[in-house]
Amino acid sequence: MYEKKIPLPLECGLAMTREILGGKWKPNLLFAISEGINRPSQLHRAIPQSTKRVLNLQLKELEEFEVIEKKIYHQLPPKVEYHLTERGETLMPLLRQMNEWGDKNRSFIKNIILNRTKVLD
Amino acid sequence: MYEKKIPLPLECGLAMTREILGGKWKPNLLFAISEGINRPSQLHRAIPQSTKRVLNLQLKELEEFEVIEKKIYHQLPPKVEYHLTERGETLMPLLRQMNEWGDKNRSFIKNIILNRTKVLD
DNA sequence: TATATAGGGGATAAAATTATCCCCGGAGGA
DNA sequence: TCCTCCGGGGATAATTTTATCCCCTATATA
């Protein structure tokens, strides 16, 4: 695991939340898991822009902070499931709000992004 | 401005919100501005872990997405104020929730972070 | 035998974000 | 004259995060 050289401010609530939800795919993973997409391969299919590898890394971090838990079925073929913990459930209202805000403002943001380069020529 | 090589998924609400709030100091800036800390120098004093430079960059991005607006008083010495736009106001519930969640879970997260290295020896 | 599925990770490259350094103009005070 | 404050930014380094590549076990199926 990567060890930060610049420590994060442990007194700041915003920084704490950022530490948990800051990963690029973490909100999507949590959302998907909350919707019953629990197995690694399913999650990868649900988020195909990412990679197995990256998703595994982010899942591991979510697990480290006990926001999700990993159930390993010792079978062959192997089976693994991720589920939200109680702590993880408390994040869902936040995630839903994020998703809503993004949806409501999408077209506006989209325009700004798409027009950035076009304005210059 | 940096131009992304990997485009962000414009269809995803979560990604949209991340695009706006993802910067390291953006939540803190918005929070501070909402509390009446409006001038650049004040903001820097409020967030001394960061730098004028970095704060300026992040403020500019927040401005680009019309989450804050910049009022320039053409005076000497110069005076500048940032204020939330209506769009920016709609982010505040989200930011407050982030802050609360982080506060409530701080001690737990703190322990995990602080014990990471200690466990190994 | 070859390919697909399930699960996984080490090593390294690339991308993206932050930080640092040092400079600018102009006003005011010691 | 020197230092402080207000505002700002270019250039570049450093840090941090993601992505890519390729390999692993084992079962099942064409």
Image (spheres, coloured by chain):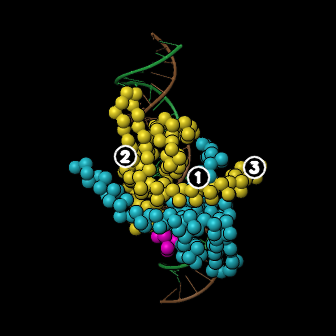
Chain colours: A yellow, B cyan, C brown, D green
Q: Residue at x 51, y 65 (%)?
A: B97
The residue furthest left is: B121
Which label was assigned to residue B14?
A: 1
| Mark nearer the viewer, 2 or 1 | 1
Q: The residue under label 2 is which amino acid type?
A: Met
Task: Look at mark 2 in the image and give the residue it sits on.
Answer: A1
Q: Residue at x 65, y 54 (%)?
A: A103
Crowding near the residue tagged with mark 3, few <14, some 14–19, many ≥20 C-alpha atoms within 10 Å: few
Is residue B49 magenta-colored?
Answer: yes
Crowding near the residue tagged with mark 1, few <14, some 14–19, many ≥20 C-alpha atoms within 10 Å: many
Task: Look at mark 3 in the image and give the residue it sits on.
Answer: A118
Q: Is residue A30 visible?
A: yes
Residue C3 x, y percent position in the rendering: 51, 18
Q: Main secondary structure of the magenta part?
A: loop
Residue C16 vs residue B32, the one in the foreground? B32
Asked if residue B25 lies left or right of residue A75, the reply is right
Residue B95 x, y percent position in the rendering: 54, 65
